[in-house]
Image (cartoon, helix red, strand yellow):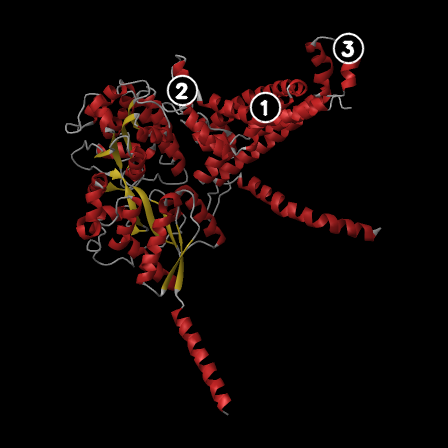
Amino acid sequence: MIRRAITDLVLVGPAALAIVIFIFLPAIVVILLAFTDYQFGSSTANWIGVDNFTSLFGSKIGRKALTNTLIYAGIVIPASVGLGLLVAIGLHHLTTSLPKASNILRAIYFLPVSATLVAMAVSWQMLLHPSLGLINNWLSILGIAPQQWLSNRDLVLYTLAVIGIWQSVGYNMVLFLAGLAAIPKTLYDAAEVDGVTGGWSRFWVVTWPMLGPITMFVIIVTAANAFRVFESVAAMTKGGPAFASDTIVYAIYREGFVYFKAGYASAITVIFFIALLLLTALQIALVERKVHYR
Amino acid sequence: MKLLKTACKLILSFGIALSAASALAATEIRVHYAIPTIWAETQEKLADAFMAKNPDMKIKIDGPAESYADGVQRLLREAVAGTAPDVAYVGLNRWRILEDRGLTKPLDSFLPKDKLAAGYTPALLSLGSYKDVQHALGTSASNMVLYVNPDLVEKAGGSMDNFPKDFDGIIELAAKIDALGDNIEGIWIGRHDWRFQSLLGSHGGRPLNEDESDITFDSNAGMTAASLYKRFAQEGGMSSMTQNDARQAFPSGTLGMFFESSSLLKRFEEGAAGKFQVTVLGTPVVAKDNVYFPTGGSAILMLTDDETKQKVAWEYISFVTGPEGQKIIVENTGYAPANKIVLDDAKYLGAYYDKNPNAKVAHAQVAAHAGPWYAYPGAEGVAVTDLIAAALVELTEGADVEKTVSDLAETLRLQLKMK
């Protein structure tokens, strides 16, 4: 018995130790730092209690980052899950009629997922350039006034949201495709026998319930990615103009590594972590009730 | 017997060779720099020239940081870990971050008695001193200049010979260029702390008072300087494009006038080659006295505590800030020099300036009006520069100048704990 316990410990020990040293300890340090005014590189720090937290929720810039992130996620999550599903259903049916085209389209939709967003940001920047960019040139051919996609304060967040959708639709599509392929054909036959014939009712009666578990997974992953939006902001707008595209994770980076306010950045990190944890728990609790596992 | 003798000789000569080698073992110092796209080749050339001159000293260049911001981050990290380099090139507006944490070693005891004779003018020394202690020396300098596209100016009915000397004339011309077409812009300036400080300096204003205990850009000079942002947008048709957009638009010939750092001269000339002839003019000087232009670029500073290394470090610092090192830097980067001797003595850069008249305009402005790029003091120092940029955005969108600037000054005073 003891021998067995020792063997188990030897097997579990090294990995557990590594997790404690490299993940748990730094996390504790971050939580402690959140209550100090520590400046990156300085040798001292003062305990300032919850000041960092009050200034996050009390300052205009802090609240702006929070609302921006919520708006961004509010657009990106439904749009990229919905579009992902739509594209997946289309491509799934296309496999029977036009298998080659379906494969090519799959690759095209998946391309943004496999490309590095930072590199793609450069292309987006060129496309969105106010006077040289293709998008404004096309718009002016159509007689629409050119827009300042990345430097108009009222527009920039939505531009970034569209880029966010563009980036995640392909990933969601692949997951939904796998889900669709796993639905047994017999269920559709059975539904037909029971009088479900229209495409729309077939979707509601068979496809949608059967995609439940996949949808839950897609929503959670998309939500986590949307709330963590960073690369597109850092590469294209740096949170500007005038904090119009500042998001929570970019604010963590900005405060910690541009302003060197490590204490404040830690406080945002702690809040962000707790919020994401709660959100995921809530989603699982809500969605789980409606999901039918086989 | 003979064998033994030979063996002895061999051992002896080996020993001598060993000790000779150790006497020759050069003292090595580690050097940090940032922005390899501009500096990589120049740094190699500087190190090679220095080592050729001082065979007993060795320069080891650390892998460069991507930007000055990354560079300072890395230096702070390395200082915490005890692996900081001995000498570092940092952004002229960032060495105070290192000074604030007590990492820089004062250079006063190393500097020669007659600093002016060594080419270090008071203006140039001001770039690296704080409270009368010399923490850093400028190694390369840049000012805000006005880049002009002469083709667009002429199309709009202006002429380069009769180019406006003041901001009013420039705004008028900008409006005319802007009217040339949908995708043609008249003028652009970054909504950014450094550009605002430049306009402020041109009006004789300062962002901070002498002992840095109060914000002073809400003066008359500051209001006038800030109002230019609003006028550029409202009267000159300045758009809200980003810094990167503007840097692409100018060399492609769709932007008429562009207030930007002189350090981009080479890039713009290369980008516009074959399309139009980039022309550089000085930023208009409005006030009679007290005019200065905040200077960007890089400074060099000493981080090592070791005395032998400090000696080598100083030799290196005085070489790169001296005329020979400055000649290499100017010729390779296009930055303005931070040593008066290279500017005055044609034997160093005379031929270079004959070939690059635009560079001469920019460098003359640095020599005449170089001044510190004010860094706001304290923990919130970097953070408030983003607040300034945000206020400038509001001005270009039509906010009231008086109210915006006074509110900004008050916010800064509170955030910087000045009251």
Say what secondary structure mark 1 lies in: helix
Q: Which mark is residue A192?
A: 3
Inter-mark Cα distance, 2 to 3: 49 Å
Q: Quadrant of residue B197?
A: top left
**Viewer-proximal residue among B169 and A99:** A99
**Viewer-proximal residue among A91 and B356:** A91
Is the residue B218 above or below the residue A34 in the image? Answer: above
Closer to the camera: disc 3 or disc 1?
Answer: 1
* Mark positioned earlier in the residue sequence (3 or 1): 1
- Image location (x, y in percent) of residue B178: 27, 20
C-beta proximity under 8 Å, tags 2 and 1? no
**Viewer-proximal residue among B309 and A39:** B309
- Image location (x, y in percent) of residue B342: 21, 50
Asked if marks 2 and 1 fall on the same chain, the answer is yes
Kindly identify the amino acid type of the residue bearing the numbered disc 3.
Glu
**Viewer-proximal residue among A197 and B393:** A197
Inter-mark Cα distance, 3 to 1: 30 Å
Say what secondary structure mark 2 lies in: helix
Within 10 Å of disc 1 (Cα), the crowding (few <14, some 14-19, many 20+) is: some
Within 10 Å of disc 2 (Cα), the crowding (few <14, some 14-19, many 20+) is: many
Q: Which mark is residue B290?
A: none
Is the residue A128 above or below the residue B200 in the image? Answer: above
- Label 3 chain ID: A
Kindly identify the amino acid type of the residue bearing the numbered disc 1.
Leu
- Label 2 chain ID: A
Q: Quadrant of residue A289?
A: top right
* Mark positioned earlier in the residue sequence (2 or 3): 2
Which residue is identified by label 2? A136
Q: Which mark is residue A105?
A: 1
- Image location (x, y in percent) of residue B199: 26, 32
The tally of labels here is 3
